[in-house]
Image (spheres, rainbow, N blue to C red):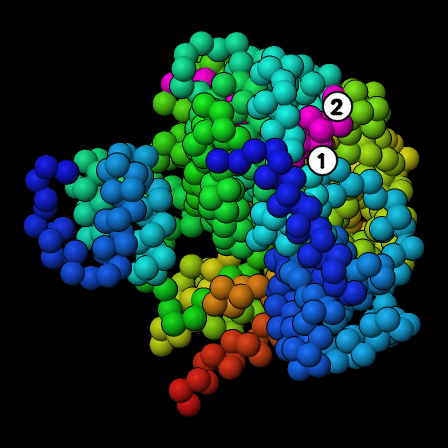
Amino acid sequence: MANPSPVKSEKSEDRRWRLVNRTMRMHGGRPDALIETLHVIQESFGYLDLDALKYVAQSLRLPLSRVYGVATFYHFFSLKPPGEHTCVVCTGTACYIAGSSAILKQVREDLGISENQTTPDNKVSLLTARCMGSCGLAPAVVFDGEVKGKMTPASVMAQLGRWRHDDD
Amino acid sequence: MMTIEELQDIGRLEKEKQEGFRHRIHVCVAAGCLSCQSGLVKDALEKEVSRRGLESWCQVKGVGCLGLCSAGPLVSIEPDGVLYKGVEVSDASDILESLGGSPISRLECSLEQPFFRKREKIVLENCGKIDPESVEDYISENGYEALYTALRLMTPNEVVDQVVRSGLRGRGGAGFPTGLKWTTVAKAGGSIKFVVCNADEGDPGAFMDRSVLESDPHRVLEGMAIAAVAVGASYGFIYLRAEYPLAVKRIRTAIARAERLGVIGHNIFNTTFSFDVKVRLGAGAFVCGEETALLASIEGRRGSPRPRPPYPAEHGLWGYPTLINNVETFANIAPIIRKGGDWFASIGVGKSKGTKVFALAGHVKNTGLIEVPMGTSLRVIIYEIGGGIQGDRRFKAVQSGGPSGGCLPERFLDMSMDYESLAQAGSIMGSGGLIIMDESSCMVDVARFFVEFCMTESCGKCAPCRIGTAQIYNTLKKITEGEGKPSDLELLDELCDLVKNTSLCGLGQTAPNPVLSTMKYFLNEYKAHTDDHTCPSCACRMNNHAEEQK
């Protein structure tokens, strides 16, 4: 990139942004680096904010509309910051017929939020996934990245209870 | 730089090293068992071995999927041929104690049961046997020998010819003849070509590709490299779901180790041939399993499909000829080159050659991964290998092919599982997910589930899919809530016909399949919902419309 943007110099201070810049450089700053770059940002910061999207658009010389379009097209990317903990309920076929909707209903009622929302105290985000390939252990729920199989509404609530009483 | 002698030396040394151990404890470290803490079991076993000072006598090794996911964590003892199920950290001491003696009966899982006996392994032959993170271990099982043969002892045409003769068909869903695809890309002009591995296993209920990548990643790499030799490509991409972090890690490790050995990368086996492979992560879009959408995603764009022709074989990544095959297809290549296309063609039935890996899930006793010859009947798969229905309830339907497939009733139990028979019955082979359902599942609700999936996954580019799936969903939702009318069934027929015949890509064209097949075989269930406002399986929450009307 011939003209380093002002944002870039500011962002090269942070180790996480250096990682993002490195990803773009490794792909020669080409447009096809976009999705890989967004993955790195989400992994480092937990979500994609508008500032980050603008920065990537500028660095890869893409219209912001295209970057925003890609970021919103793929379900894996989130434009909202996640809560302290995430609970992902699998709603794939095997988990569905093994009762994942009952789990989801219970979690929704108990936390008072629906999918893709975070509790007001910012403790727990509730998400759903379309199959994580743990069908042999259906129904599966992912707690902070760790897949647990053969779950029941009660066992999920027990885990959520532990999270919510962390600070009490 | 690597010669065949060096390759064989690596394999021989590794074999000797392993055979030097009196006992080898294999702990399954694929995602299924890892989620029941098999990692901790492995640590405990290692600790126990060193506590007893048995390091030179007993090896503890993490291996890929042992198949029977529902009984995890699984541990196998070689060469004794003992399998333990449901192993816990506290069992480590007992396991070491029992080595050389009789197996622990409370943990033993019989290898004589049909789940293990009825399998025929080609794709999964190394799964549960080798350490997926060790390239040496893969080489000790004849790994990369087929690549050497293809590169040094055969011409590209001969390689393509073997694949044509094998009769191998795409394992990703549609079953397109692999040899034909390879021939087209090989004939395409130009010096830049790509080989792409479709590992975007988006079908809910399918986990074959994940297991292969987690258990035997080098097998897929070798298959891709052989394909590159055959079609003359120098660049490869593996398009892998971000939802499979372990598979991502294992394949990245595999690429790095293979590059270091010189079996992937520049000047493979001292030739001028180079093959550079990169991983690209998907980001949770089911439509990206469609090949043109997948290519758009690799190029960093939204995963919107485009009309074909031109096919990717002629006009693919950045406009260059591109060969796209599924993980399982590539995993079949090395054995075909090693043993010959005719050997492969001798397995299977009719136009469906070889074996198929199925992911068994749902209301079946033994859930997990199986590999059987094409043509095996559903009855054998469900009742012998699968051990029957949980709680000995009644079988109702089997769903194959994910959201693009169909639900087949009891009378198809003796049907041979091959591409043609499945298509004739109104379903598809798909990627190999088999969901078994018992009488507690409502077929209308299952159809609604799949249509909801396709509706949310529709990329929105073409109207029939974007709007049509939403209309089908709304109608089914109404029916499952007890608000349906008899005329809704005609409406469904009409909508399905429209979406099927006018959608742009495979997602929309096949989205009505679950509805059509359930309406064909379980019409009485639909009628019970629309006429009597009752759900025979008691799965739907009806709004008690019937009583109100009375």
- Side of A21 relative to B129 (left or right): left
Most foreground residue, A6 or B341 = B341
Please report contact status of discs 1 and 2: CB closer than 8 Å, yes or no.
Answer: no
SS category of the residue bearing label 1: strand
| Protein chain holding label 1 | B
Q: Quadrant of residue A159?
A: bottom right
Q: Position of residue B143 (x, y in %)?
A: 65, 39
Label 2: how many Cα within 10 Å (few below 14, some 14–19, many 20+)? some
**Residue at 35% in and 42% down:** A35
Q: Position of residue B142 (x, y in %)?
A: 69, 39
Question: Residue extending furthest bottom?
Answer: A168
Most foreground residue, B130 or B278 = B130
Q: Is residue B336 magenta?
A: yes
- Name the residue beneath numbered marker 2: B340
How far apart marks 1 and 2 lie (CA) works out to 34 Å
| Protein chain holding label 2 | B
Whether residue A120 is situated above or below residue B349 in the rendered picture: below
Q: Is residue A21 magenta?
A: no
- Name the residue beneath numbered marker 1: B406
| Residues rendered magenta in the picture | B319-341
